[in-house]
Amino acid sequence: MHRIFAAIKQTLFPESKSSASPEELRIAFAKRYTHFRSLLTANNNALQAMAELEKVYYSGESYRMAFVRSKISTILINVYKMIRNILAMSDGKYKELEPIFDKISNDISEIVERKRNFQQGPFILELNEVRRKDKDEAGEKMANLGELAALPGIMVPPGFVVTASATRHFLTPDHIAEINRLLQVLDPDNLDDLYSACEKMQNIVMNTPLPPDLEESLHLHVNRLEAGSHPGCKVALRSSAQGEDTAGVSFAGLYSTFLDIDKSMISESYKKVIASKYGPRAIAYRRKRGYRHEDIEMCVGCLLMVDALVSGVVYSRDPEEENSAVMRINATSGIARGVVDGTTVTDLYLVSRTQPFSVVYREMRQGRGTGREHAADTGSLTVKQIQRLAETALQLESHFGQAQDIEWSFDRQGDLYILQSRPIPASRKEPAQNAVEATGPSETAEPPFLTGGICASGGIASGEVFLVDSEEQIQKFPKGGVLVIRHPLPEWAPLLGRAAAVIAENGSEAGHLATVSREFGIPALFSLDGAMKVLVNGQTITINSSARAVYKGRREDLLRLNIVKRDIMAGSPVQRIVTESLQYITPLNLNDPASTHFKSTWCETLHDITRFCHEKSVSEMFNYGKEHHFDKGAAKRLVGDVPLEWWVIDLADGFRPGLDSKDKSVRVEDIVSVPMQAIWHGISAFPWEGPPPISARGFGSIIFQSTMRPDLDPSVASGLTTKNYFLVSQNFCNLSVRLGYHYAMIEAYLSDLLTESYVTFRFKGGAADMRRKAVRARLLADILKRYDFRVELRSDALLARIKKQPVEYLEQRLQILGYLITHARQLDMVMNQPEAVEQYRNKFIQDIDEMLSRKSTLTIEEPSHG
Amino acid sequence: MDRKCKIMLVDDELNFREIMAKFFQRRKIDFETAGSCLEGLDLLGQGCFDVVVMDVSMPGLDGIECMAEMKKVQPDLEVIILTGHASLNVGINGMKKGAFDYCLKPVDFDELLEKIVLAKEKAAAKDY
């Protein structure tokens, strides 16, 4: 309401004190412009970071928590900056954005910073008391081992587990913070860096003395083991980390196990196992699979060494073949270490999974002289041992409900000990690495007919082309069609639920529509030159956006390649964090600026906030000329061979340097505002040819009157109705034209940064009744659409915009606007004669096309005139 | 930027100060370094500074507290905060408490330089 009153007041008392001095105006403009620019930059950065986060999330490739944190931080900071800037630009109009942002950022940080709740328990658990349920304290391996020790007929070595509670007692939050710090700054791709950081982290562990109470109880338990066995007995210290051996994530062989450890070395060895959590391989693997180091705590099993005669590994199903009917045994004499780490040559047995477990294949590789395959040689295992192993393997498989990878030893008394049992990860054959990158699988297949662009969302899909270049066509868009558009505007987002793929002539992977494409999992190929020209409505195509290629027809050979890639991060804690966080970041609910739901209170995600701030910042800028009234004394009159009266106000660097600032007039060639020059080019390109307007309207008398009277005092001139004001800076121009009842405004900012650039045009009214006004507005709308403006038309009010285009392109659009505001006046007389309207439409288009082609040759000659 | 103001780096990590010193020298940027907030405050009293690059996690007064102290002395000081393994909110909090911008460690030098330039521009704009 305020502003309505202000506008009325302004109309009635144009000299009221809201008029600003040129200096005030200049400062106000500069300030607002600084905020606008920094809002646009923040918008860019936020969208870029969102795109990067989503790209890795959907890629199936691995990413690190540090990456996730840094992207989310970047998004939060930049969205916050956008809010700060829009508040500054709008004098706090959108204050409610702040609590909305706070709520979203708190929700996200709760997800990202979520800490596990630890229950502090005993430092040591007896192995025979440990069960699966104790895995948080005993680690996966020892929890499994304790569980199976309780099964009838199964033996495990006597021992105990040093728990996660003990580890937390040993490594305090200070140590963890120091390790975190090293991990944070670690460049994972730099191996030297990785190794030296690992050494530092492991030194932290090794140089920290065990707390006395932990050390004491460790020794107490080893002594107890010794008492139950024989003096001087040796133990094995085995890593037992949390989260190992689950959901297809094996962590196999990452952590250290130490065999044959003497009692005197027990504390040292315990620390070494704990330190192995920070080995280079372990760190690299955890990162790859999406585990943070705090997701995994290291526990340590201390087991009496088995005096092994023969040891090895049995797979209850051969892992190299799905649904295999055989199990696979690798065996070696002595202890099992070499089998596990692959350093020892082992005998191989493939054994039937059914009674009597006959050997179907054997390979005796263990060195017995040189004889590799003596017929009578049973190798390292006897038939009885093989049967015993097979029975046990099936027993464990049925207990745990899936095929097992079991480490075992037979001791000299012939007893079978199980040292470890873990599930075999389900075999998932990965598709050929380059399948999606390949442009064509067979050499005889037809090559793509369109290539290039930017892959905004990877994938392969097929469908019928549907070109959309106006809002009416949205309703007609067929389900399963390939959406082909000029600009990937957020307005098209609702179509993506129905589209098989999206192709756009412009745009990049960081835009809103790219985000939504990835969210919906449909291929999107942007910045594909000439797509609107080459592709024909109804034509069936196949698009492989990853390969940036478009093929004719439906290509089953390509579509077959579109296998869902195995997701290496699947089920990991880091992936879970991103999945949950993205809900608050990327979904876009605010699609349509014209909708009544386009309000700050409807912002549910950070993406919504960016969209809202961006839209509002643009209108705040657009309204600049409308809301800021200026002291007419600040204006300089444009002199030279110019039609009408034009006044120019320099906001900043819009005039040639060295111009006398006290001069009351300025010549066109002294103006260095690029957008104003372009508009002027359009205004002056053709002489005004139509019938002169009725002079009673008040402006006919001055049309084409060459005004060589620079002494005219602007404040006493014929009043607002006949004056046209340019507000200019080098890159900015706002032109208000009021001629009779016409009101038109052109505003432009031209920048090398595409996101900053825009041209906007408003047109309202005219000396005619409502129906005729509407006809004129529609005619202008049609012409502007023809030259790629986005046009909104309500009755006789027209708003046309163009954004994110190169400077040269926008200059041409400004020329068109300059032409139209000059010549559209002729329509006044003929609005009720349809054939005349048609005639003007054709003439306008013809003139504009001529002007644009003339321009390109002119630029070459121009320098010679001086 | 007529008045010759320097930028100040406050970070408790000697290594990082040395790397940044080389970086500033190579780009002919006038700078001073401080190893703690108190050192930084001393420097602020002695010379002309318009931009401070400040590590968040320091023993003693942390970067956010230090920023508040410095702004008491010189309200128009522009502060860019740096942080390694901080919680997400550290950045936002810093911004809310008046930081000009925020950089994550390990630092992307070009990004930091851009932010320094912008901070200097903003500081210079306040001069008139």
Image: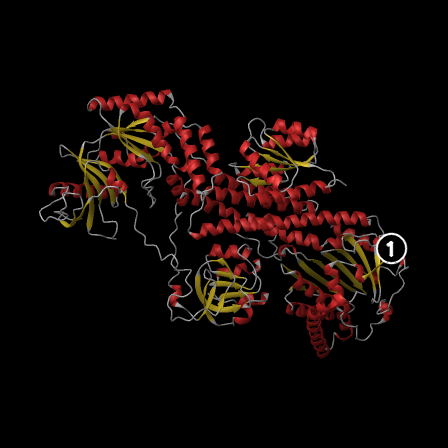
The residue under the point 74% across, 67% down is A862
Looking at this view, is A516 or A409 the one in front?
A409
Quarter of image, res B116 = top right
Picture coordinates of residue A233 (x, y %)? 22, 25
Residue A488 visible to an observer of this rendering: yes
Position above or below: A280 against A61:
above
Q: Secondary structure at mark 1?
A: loop
Q: Chain of mark 1?
A: A
Picture coordinates of residue A207 (x, y %)? 40, 26
The residue under the point 22% across, 46% down is A316
Picture coordinates of residue B91 (x, y %)? 57, 38
Question: In the picture provided, is B52 more to the left or to the right than A216?
Answer: right
Position above or below: B27 against A799:
above
Question: In the picture provided, is A654 more to the left or to the right than A271?
Answer: right
**Residue pointed to by mark 1:** A663
The residue under the point 37% across, 63% down is A560
Give the tally of numbered discs.
1
Which colouring convention does the figure follow?
A: secondary structure
